[in-house]
Amino acid sequence: MGRMPSDRRLTPSHGSDAVKPPTPPSHLKASGKRTWKRLWEAGKAWLGPPDEPAVKAVCEQVDQIADLRGMAVQVERPELEQKYLHAIQAAEKSLMSSLSELGFTPVAQARLGFTVSQVAEAGSGPRRRGRRRTTETTRE
């Protein structure tokens, strides 16, 4: 059985020696490919080749959420729109769990042996402060 990211204790310097991120799977849509790139860049200090299937699954989840959002704005019946919104919320909850398993929350990073300052020093901390990142641009 492969090791999960939470099983590793790495130092931030590992990221500087990390290999180039793998090419994203061709079946990913634009949102999934953007997420692929962001995850490999942000997680360069702890992600490695064994994590590729999990990163792929996360990117597929992001694509699914984007598809659900697109469908939700096209429906005209409020009760159907609510079903899509509930599906989106469930998918986002699953996505957050997956991201945590890959080490993209402060608690998960602490399990990996990183402190907040180490993650920021490795350049894999959040790019922006004060704005919540979403998987797709919010439509109004």
Image (tube, rainbow, N blue to C red):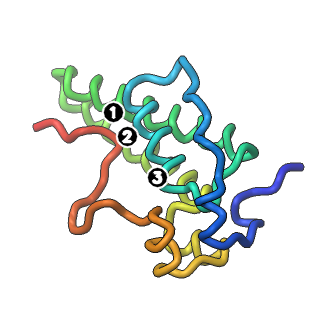
The quarter holding residue 111 reads bottom right
What SS does tag 3 mark? helix
Q: What separation in Å lies between label 2 and label 1 (alpha carbons)? A: 6 Å
Instruction: Please name the residue that numbered disc 1 is placed on.
Output: 84
In the rendered structure, are the residues bearing label 2 and label 1 in contact, judged by CB atoms less than 8 Å apart? Answer: yes
**At label 3, which amino acid type do we have?**
Lys
| Marked residue nearer the N-terminal end (1 or 3) | 1
Give me the residue at 67% from left, 40% from top: 52
| Observer-nearest of 28 and 44 | 44
128 with respect to 38 (left or right): left
Mark number, residue 39: none
Image height of 5 relative to 113, above or below: above
Mark number, residue 93: 3
75 with respect to 60 (left or right): left
**Looking at the picture, how far across and down is residue 25, in whole percent?**
58, 24
| Observer-nearest of 58 and 43 | 43
Q: Nearer the viewer, mark 1 or mark 3?
A: 3
Q: Is residue 40 visible?
A: yes
User: How many residues crowd around disc 3 within 10 Å: few (fewer than 14), some, or many (20 or more)?
Assistant: few
Mark number, residue 88: 2
**Looking at the picture, how far across and down is residue 133, in whole percent?**
30, 53
